[in-house]
Structures are given as C-alpha cells and as structure tokens.
Image (spheres, rainbow, N blue to C red):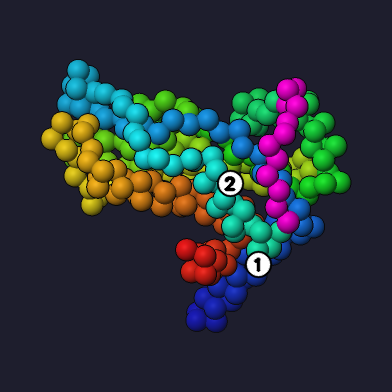
Amino acid sequence: MKQTHVLRKLTLGMMLIFSIAYSSAQISKIAIISLEDTTIIHQHVGVTRFTNFRDTLNLNIAVKQYLEQQLVKYLSQKFEVSIVSQLTDSFVYRPKIWGGLTKNFKNWMTNMKDQYDLVIIINNISLTPEMNMLLPRNSSGLFSKTKYMSFYTTISFDAYRTSDLKELEYYNMGGKFVTPCKSFKLPDDKKTFTPEMLALLKDGFIKHLDSRVEHFLTKTYLMIQGDIDEIKANNP
C-alpha cells in the first residue's frame, strides 16, 4: 500500500514536470500587450438598495504599469520579454470566450512569430452572476457589504503561442479571485478614508494584484511557485 502511494506521488510529480516542460518548450521570447481598462473603486452593498454606493478610490497606483512590471520581473528570469505598446488601429483582440480570435489578431500573431514565441494579453473579464458582487466590468479595488470586505480586480491574462495560435489554458477565475480584507475596519460613513487607511488599502490591493499574476504564471506553467518565491525574496 505504501509503495502504491509513493508511486502515485512520483507519477504526479513527473506529470507536473512534463507539463511545465511542455508549456515552456521552445518559448524564449515573450511579448506583453496591455489592453486592460480599469478604474479603482469602492463598491459597497448596504442593507437596502438606498445605502448602496460606488466611489472612486484614490490608491495612487498605476495598475497597467504595475502589472507589466511584475510580469517582466518574473518572466525575464527565464525569457526575453518585451512590452509591445505600438499597435496598429486595426489591431482588435477578442478572447475566445467571446466568439473566437479575430482574423486580424491571428494575422498579427502569424506575422510576429519570428519575433515572439508567446504573446501575453492583459485584459478584462466579466464576473459571473453567481458571484453576486454587482461590480462593473472595467474596475478594480474594494468590495464591501455589512461585515465583509475583499479586494478584487476584473483584470486577467491570456497567453498564445505564435507558432500555432494555441492558448495556454488555465482557469482564470481560480486562485484568489477575491482576497478577503479581514484586518481593516470601514469608517462609520463607509466613505471617508484617512491617509493611513488608504495606505493600508493600497498595500492590500497590491498584494491581491500580485496573487493574480502568480496564479496566471503558475497555472500556465510558465513559472513554478518556488522560482517566484525566490525572485520575490531577492527582489522585494
């Protein structure tokens, strides 16, 4: 029985190694394209609909640049990484869940296959109705109701091989899709945050963004958690 358990663990370990090797095989150059659009907000759900509100939340963080910075920090340890900011007006990206990749995006990918092996798209996703969070699609920040608070973002990541237009599939709603905020108490009016409160919220929100980046990188097997932890320790 013990031998069977050990064999099963070895088999799972070999499968993981194979998955990582397969995902990273023949990938040396990666392009990052930022198409996300987000406003940092505080969405509060009160006891009645009359006490619901949505306010902008000034956390003083450039989300787009921060996410690019984090992806480059990790991926550049293994790959040659480029930020692609100059795109033609005809460049249109539509995730597969919205009906498939556009023809011009496929053409762009095909034309880029000599320059990049993989293209990462930073974009937005829609929350499922089952989450019952009443959040606008292009938003990030703090969600609260009665005694519950969490950080969230609708920003997500897609990755495609330029050689065959295949997506590195993973469950983008998995991991810490929301991060509960347990150590923070809302002010009495739920709206007026002191500079100290905003600093705490900013720190928590950044950690949530980090968790989304790590989820993407590890679940697509572009990186393993041990390597990410080492990079974070050396580059806090």
**Residue 26 visible (yes or no):** yes
The residue pinned by badge 1 equals 17
User: Could you tell whether 115 is left or right of 64 in the image?
Assistant: right
Q: Residues within 10 Å of mark 1 (few under 14, many from 20)?
A: some
As drawn, 51 above or below 152: above
First in residue order: circle 2 vs circle 1: 1
Q: Residue at x 49, y 48 (%)?
A: 212
Closest to the camera, between mark 2 and mark 1, is 2
Q: CA distance from mark 2 to mark 1?
A: 27 Å
Q: Position of residue 145 (x, y in %)?
A: 23, 34
Circle 1: element type: helix
Tell me what residue is drawn at x 46 percent, y 52 percent.
211
Mark identifier at residue 89 = none
Q: Which residues are magenta?
A: 80-91
Q: Which mark is residue 68?
A: 2
Q: Position of residue 154 (x, y in %)?
A: 47, 35
Q: Residue furthest left?
A: 188
Q: Is residue 42 above or below residue 112?
A: above
Whether the magenta-drawn stretch holds residue 110 is answered as no
Vertical placement of residue 144 versus 176, above or below: above
The count of marks equals 2
Is residue 15 something one can see in this rendering? no
Disc 2 packing (10 Å; few <14; some 14–19; many ≥20): some
Q: Outermost residue, top direction?
A: 50
Q: Nearer the viewer, residue 14 or 217?
A: 217
Which amino acid does the dot numbered 2 rest on? Answer: Glu
Residue pictured at 48% horizontal, 69% vertical: 233
Image point (60%, 74%), residue name:
10
Quarter assignment of residue 167: top right
Q: Amino acid at mark 1?
A: Ile
Check residue 83 for magenta coloring.
Answer: yes
